[in-house]
Image: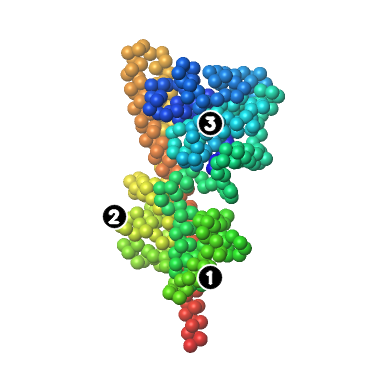
Amino acid sequence: MATTSLWHIGGNIKDVINYVENPEKTVLKDELKQLGDVCDYVRRPGGIKEKKLITTLNCNTTCALEEMLIVKQGFRKTDGYMAWHGYQSFKPGEISEELCHEIGVKLAKEMWGDRFQVIVTTHLDKEHLHNHFCFNSVSFRDGKKYNYSKKEIARLRETSDRLCQEYGLSIIEKPHKAAARPVWMDEKTGKPTRYNVYRADIIDAMEKSNSMQGFQNYLVRLGYDVDLSGAHWKIKLPKYEHYTRMDTLDPRFTPEVIHEFIGQTRRFIRNQSAEVTYPASMPKEWRTKSFFEILLSGTKLYKLYLYYCYQLGIYPKGMNYKPTSPYLKEDLRRCDEISRQTDYLAENNIDTMEDLKKDRSEIQGKMDDLIAKRTKLQNKIRRASPEQKEILRGEKKELTTEITTLRKKLKLNEGIEKRSVGMRDNLERLMNNEVRAQEQTKNRQRKESMER
């Protein structure tokens, strides 16, 4: 099973070639600790096995960069995208190093070998073996630039799958768009993301429902938009534009399996309603609709952050509470950042958006002054004697440390303004969902009372 991807590289073509030819990734680390350049390693006698892990097409291994630049300069196309960088990644344990590289070379030849200069390397630094491709954005044949269209995306995937099948390897039968890498990393480490929050709530709804209506009501009570029509049931929170298919979250979340599961548990349980809880330490007056309205109508940034920290269970410290609302669960993976932003507001006595912008202006002003001083210092270093240079470099290092600290503060400041909008939206949805749930409960009780 192999996955593929390709993306363009702007700026300096040397950067991507240095990465692709990184010795620590190209061959086993313990064999290459003393080597600083993979090209030197490939050139030295005795590197027979390692040579197989680097292959170049239409250019020489020892001077690939220079030859790519000659083509660019010859066709006067040195601007725009400098190169294309891609990978082909295999399932762990399914393929050997040599076969991985062989398939990678064949893929590169079919895809780009007739028109472009290509470097193919096999990286061994991960559990899954994977090939990297770097190729010139300009064709050596006609000077035309590579166009990565939807047709090319499909051709890359189809070619990779066909080669895998020829070698008896598995392929992805039903490919779907992968999650962004930060989300994938959080999923892998068990941090709350939109997708594992969805999974957990769907499982809860299945276990606490004895009918499909109860299953749907449970999810709606939590604040989800639910679509149980068609062959693929879907779910989403209102803040997201697109639905997520349940069977994408877990292949077992099909209408048939959910029906069967609920049918088996029908005799043992009755429908339960989802409950959205508050931390026990939160003041009771903070839980009322009137407090929500006051909080959201004002400009009290610090109070907004403090309230959000209570809702997430960040404050008070040492509390074991975890929010039950899906609007807030996902933000738990950002709790460290939110906590830092809250501390920043408290330490700098920032209470309103005007205070925040004023503080940002002061930080920017200090940064500009320090950067100007550092530039002057750099000019002095060029003209200074060797003895003076050491002293001036020490002063420059101190300025750089101060600038780095200010940049971090500026990032926190800008993040607060951006995040406060999301906090208000989440709290407003939470409030509206609670009000709607209370009204539904009253209507149900009224209906039951009339039936008696």
**Circle 1: element type:** helix
**Marks 3, 2: nearer the viewer:** 3
**Marks 2, 1: nearer the viewer:** 1
Residue type at numbered disc 1: Met
Tell me which residue sits at (45%, 33%) in the image: 124
The answer to which of marks 1 and 3 sits earlier in the sequence is 3
Q: Is residue 361 visible?
A: no
Task: Please tell me the numbered disc located at residue 318.
Answer: 2
Whether tag 3 and tag 2 are in contact, CB under 8 A, the answer is no
Question: Residue at the top extreme?
Answer: 385
Residue type at numbered disc 3: His
Task: Please tell me the numbered disc located at residue 75.
Answer: none
Q: Nearer the viewer, residue 217 or 383?
A: 217
For label 3, the residue is: 101
Tell me which residue sits at (43%, 31%) in the image: 368
The answer to which of marks 2 and 1 sits earlier in the sequence is 1
The total of numbered circles placed on residues is: 3
**Marks 1, 3: nearer the viewer:** 3
The image shows residue 340 at horizontal and vertical percentages of: 36, 46
For label 1, the residue is: 212
Tell me which residue sits at (49%, 69%) in the image: 262
Residues at marks 1 and 3, CA–CA distance in whole angstroms:
51 Å
**Circle 3: element type:** helix
Residues at marks 2 and 1, CA–CA distance in whole angstroms:
39 Å
Question: Residue at the right extreme?
Answer: 142
The image shows residue 229 at horizontal and vertical percentages of: 61, 65
Within 10 Å of the Cα at label 1, are there few (<14), some (14-19), or many (20+) other Cα atoms? some
